[in-house]
Amino acid sequence: MHAGGLRVVYMEDVSKATARTWDLCLSTIASPSLWALAASRGLEFVAFLKAFKAMRDGFASGCFRYALMIAEKPRAEELA
């Protein structure tokens, strides 16, 4: 963002607030009918569904994080 001329004015890690999302996703994709649909639609769909466990594991370990960021471009008078 800095390289693009923006400055971060707010940042908040919301990982804990969104952690349950991945558990819900895993329970949703447990449906055999969803896997059958995925298989009928191609390998990319199957790979997409398989990625949910990796995402949950990544967030649970702290390797991945969800964050909110607000950045702004400085006004011309601030640059002078």
Image (tube, rainbow, N blue to C red):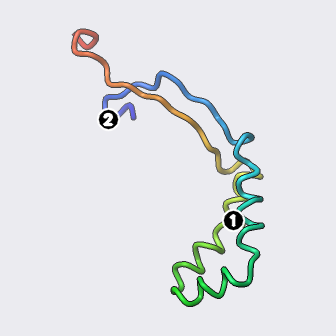
- In the figure, is residue 77 to the left or right of 45? left
* Quadrant assignment, res 55: bottom right
Q: Is residue 29 visible?
A: yes
**In this view, 7 is above or below 26:** above
Q: Is residue 42 left or right of residue 52?
A: left
Mark 1: amino acid: Ala
Looking at the rendered image, the disc whose residue lies closer to the viewer, 1 or 2, is 1
Q: Secondary structure at mark 2?
A: loop
Which comes sooner in the sequence, label 1 or label 2? 2
Residue 3 position (above or below residue 30) = above
Residue 57 visible at all: no
Q: Residues within 10 Å of mark 2 (few under 14, many from 20)?
A: few
| Residue at horizontal 64 percent and vertical 69 percent from the top | 51
Residue 68's image quarter? top right
Residue 54: image tag: 1
Which residue is at a point 71% across and 52% down the rendered structure image?
A: 59
Q: Residue at x 65, y 50 (%)?
A: 64
Q: Secondary structure at mark 1?
A: helix
Task: Find residue 71 and report its horizontal and vertical position in percent.
Answer: 42, 28
Query: Vertical placement of 4 versus 26: above or below?
Result: above
Farthest-out residue, front: 33
- For the residues marked 1 and 2, what is the alpha-carbon distance in whole angstroms? 31 Å
Amino acid tagged 2: Gly
Q: Quadrant of the C terminus?
A: top left
Which residue in the protein does label 2 denote? 4
Instruction: Mark 1: give few (<14), some (14-19) or many (20+) Cα within 10 Å.
Output: few
